[in-house]
Image (spheres, helix red, strand yellow):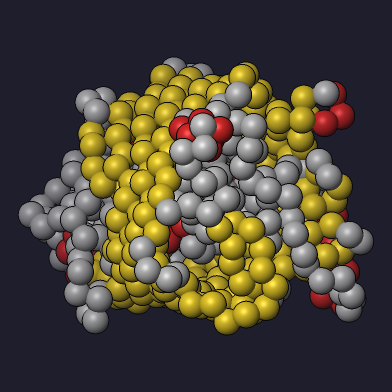
Amino acid sequence: MNYSSHAQLFPFSKYELSQKSCWLKPTKIFLLFIAFSSTSVQAKVTDYPELYDEDEFSLMGVLSDLNWHDLKNERWNIYSQATYITSFKDKFSAAYSNLNGSPNSLSAKAERSFTATFTSTLGLKAWTGAEFYVAPEMVSELPLSGLKGIGGSIQNFELQKNGTENSTWYLARAIYRQTVSLGGRQTTVNSGPMQLAGTVDSRRVVFTAGTFSILDIFDKNTYAGDLRHQFLNMAFMTNAAYDFAADARGYTTGLAGEVYYDDWAFRFARIAGPKDPNDLTKEYNLLKYYGDQAELEHKHIIKGQPGALRLLAYGNRARSGNFGDAIAAYKADPSKNATSCTGYNYESDNASAPDLCWVRKANIKMGIGINMEQSLAQDIGVFFRGMISDGKTEVYSYTSSDQSLSFGAAMKGLRWGRDKDTLGLGYAQSWISKQHVNYLNMGGIDGFIGDGKINYKPEQVVDIYYQYHAFRSAWLTLDYQHLANPAYNADRGPVDIYGARVHFEF
């Protein structure tokens, strides 16, 4: 479940939205959406500001300065990043923890957590329109409370479900991408990670095959998505209720297709999920078990400022447990409880609780969501996401959330003479279904949460960060998160979490 900066690693150009950030009262987001929906936008989307600064240090930049590499029309490139994130959770009040042996409570004691990651990305251009990329990655981590006790608002997006303090290396991405040009206006693609410099047509078809994160392609957002530069909380990387297919590190294997026609884009993908929910081993029989997603995107200009609107739907067919089925199985035979199942389970010691282990079979899980972003000025922009999933079955790959929303703003430091600094403020809230609540109230647990019982309220988080551009390709971020009703339980919390991030690019 390493969701490291997935949202900003695939093809960018001046046509794509930039990293500019923003600040605005959340209610104005809806007014902007209404205005866009009811107004004929006259201006066409042209060139947006660039994502990568050419004056930043990189091996490619050095070779270009020596005339050993063409930074405008690349045949190959290589980039690397290193990120260290530390979090401190203060002690908080809790009426109970791990009641009756249910093991998934967030510890009420003070705790420290960290992640350290290193990634290298190598790109190679082959025949016309063909590109190949590989990205080995390393992670070392110590999660809060064993990564248990938080629903849709896990405080550090880099955390994996199976990570350890020992360094673990793996191949995060191995990709073949084919672009078929169909004409339209040409724009420049800048050199960057998983991106070879050149030009791209505004009308094109793109096919992607291999191992990647689905967030490389879907649900991008300029102001909430690149979490190595933006919010630390996982609720802002994508919709918390977007239970996309992926292994325990957050990566998948499959096929994706994209069609771009000027300001419009349509995407579809079929990808592999885990053989068991939240597990590392993937199921490669994509005719039997799979994750499907489709997204429609439109980019626009409002009063001279770029924005985008995206509609996303997903559907998983997976071997998973239905909350209602687990309750019914326990009521029919109390011996089918959380301690007696020998199949894939979450190791609960609560003999008086139902368990999803008894009822796993092929189930369908679906959801639909919206993603909006709007620049308000050169240094200001806002974002909004919201998604509803059906809430019948357990978390498959992402977070324990059945419905979610997030919104916020960020502001670049132009106004105080720090143009590469960013100040961001975000709010996120998530809910779970009635069946999910009933299951937890009987002492059941899922992949992340289960205190033994529940006084249900939506889980809420406020995330405030300041990213300081320390020098050339190094950034330091300070982050504060206030988490209310952890694991949707008003009997526990609120929780204050303090974080810091050091990030290098080279």
Where is residue 464, by image quadrant? Answer: top right
Where is residue 496, by image quadrant? Answer: top right
Lateral position of residue 493 relative to residue 355, left or right: right
Front residue of 503/495: it is: 503
Front residue of 369/224: it is: 224
Give the answer, above or below, for where 52 lies relative to 38.
above
In the image, residue 378 lies at what x, y percent? Answer: 83, 45
Q: How many marks?
A: 0
Q: Looking at the image, which residue is at 64% across and 73% down?
A: 202
Residue projecting furthest to the left: 342
In the image, residue 11 lies at what x, y percent? Answer: 53, 58
Can residue 318 be seen in the rendering of this structure? yes
In the image, residue 238 lies at what x, y percent? Answer: 54, 54
Q: Looking at the image, which residue is at 65% across and 38% down?
A: 53
Front residue of 101/126: it is: 126
Q: Looking at the image, which residue is at 42% across and 29% down?
A: 82
Lateral position of residue 231 relative to residue 14, left or right: left
Can residue 105 be seen in the rendering of this structure? no
Q: Looking at the image, which residue is at 15% across and 60% down?
A: 336
Residue projecting furthest to the front: 67
In the image, residue 293 lies at what x, y percent? Answer: 45, 73
